[in-house]
Image: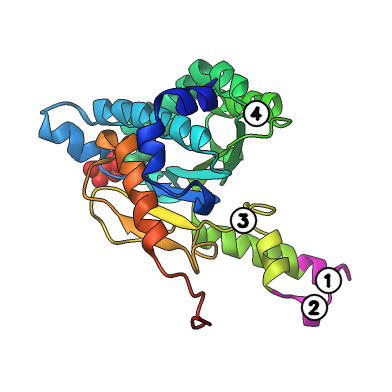
Amino acid sequence: MWLKAWKQNKVDSKDQISLERLPRHIAIIMDGNGRWAQKRALPRSMGHRAGVEALRKVVKTCSELGIKVLTVYAFSTENWSRPKDEVGVLMTLLTEYLRKELQELHQNNVVIRAIGGIADLPREAQRELDLSIKQTHNNSGLILNLALNYGGRSEIIDAVKKISNDVLTGKQKIEEIDEACFSDALFTSGLPDPDLMIRTSGEMRLSNFLLWQLAYTEIVVIQELWPDFGEKALIDAIKAYQKRDRRFGGIHKD
Ligand code: FPP
């Protein structure tokens, strides 16, 4: 099992971070696949393929560490505007990833979930996703939350519509609308907000990712391109997070 492997072989890396103050929820913008490929004169599809490998490693490390939730931005609502072939490659990679990894993820107690407009994904991808979600939903380990056809603004608009409808039908009182009820109307309902958000490839943007949920999240931007991201970079990001002073808008009481 992954957890055992970590305990037996990786004591050195584990000691670099405090296991008591781990982020509960890590969110990642996996950026830079295209540039990684371009630097090697390879087609962009190879960059995305290498990106899947990086994702596999990061999922394994998060699971070993005992992180509760990992949300990865795999396909945004804006990514449909890429050339048809590239969109096709990304959808095929998603389907392949789930087909190949499901059993190992399941054996390692991972729960697969998805956020975004899943109904608009190609049928094959939806089928694999559905199967993976159903098979793993009783697991109790890492929640791997795949953001697919996801956009933060449309998620917020959908939540507004849902709450408005509840007001119209008498299920919700306007004066009782609060942050908790709004959070509940989002795709991430029931999950803690991310403590740490990592973006690779040096870009300092949120790119419509988890706009509501990232309000107090610590952001770590890494220069490495996503396919080069691995265990060491993840540990370094967690170390950077553990040095941050999180005040949530307040002041220190000591
Ligand atoms: C950004 O790189 C990455 C994406 C748009 C897709 C992320 C997808 C993966 C890591 C692999 C797919 C994984 C699954 C499970 C579907 P970019 O293409 O924008 O890179 P660039 O900015 O260098 O061009």
Graded by Cα atoms within 10 Å as few (under 14), some (14 to 19) or many (20 or more), the crowding at tag 4 reads some
Q: Is residue 87 visible?
A: no
Residue 130, x across and y down, in percent: 65, 28
User: Relative to residue 10, is residue 146 drawn left or right?
Assistant: right
Q: Are marks 2 and 1 in contact (CB under 8 Å)?
A: yes
- Judging by the rendered image, the residue that carries numbered circle 3 is 192
Marks 2, 4: nearer the viewer: 2
Graded by Cα atoms within 10 Å as few (under 14), some (14 to 19) or many (20 or more), the crowding at tag 1 reads some
- Judging by the rendered image, the residue that carries numbered circle 2 is 176
Q: Are marks 4 and 3 in contact (CB under 8 Å)?
A: no
User: Relative to residue 173, is residue 142 drawn left or right?
Assistant: left
Graded by Cα atoms within 10 Å as few (under 14), some (14 to 19) or many (20 or more), the crowding at tag 3 reads few
The question of residue 55 being in magenta is answered with no
Assign a secondary structure to mark 1. loop
Under mark 2, the amino acid is Glu
In this orientation, which residue lies closer to the viewer: 5 or 75?
5
Under mark 1, the amino acid is Gln
User: Relative to residue 242, is residue 19 drawn left or right?
Assistant: right
Which numbered circle lies on residue 130? 4
- Judging by the rendered image, the residue that carries numbered circle 1 is 172
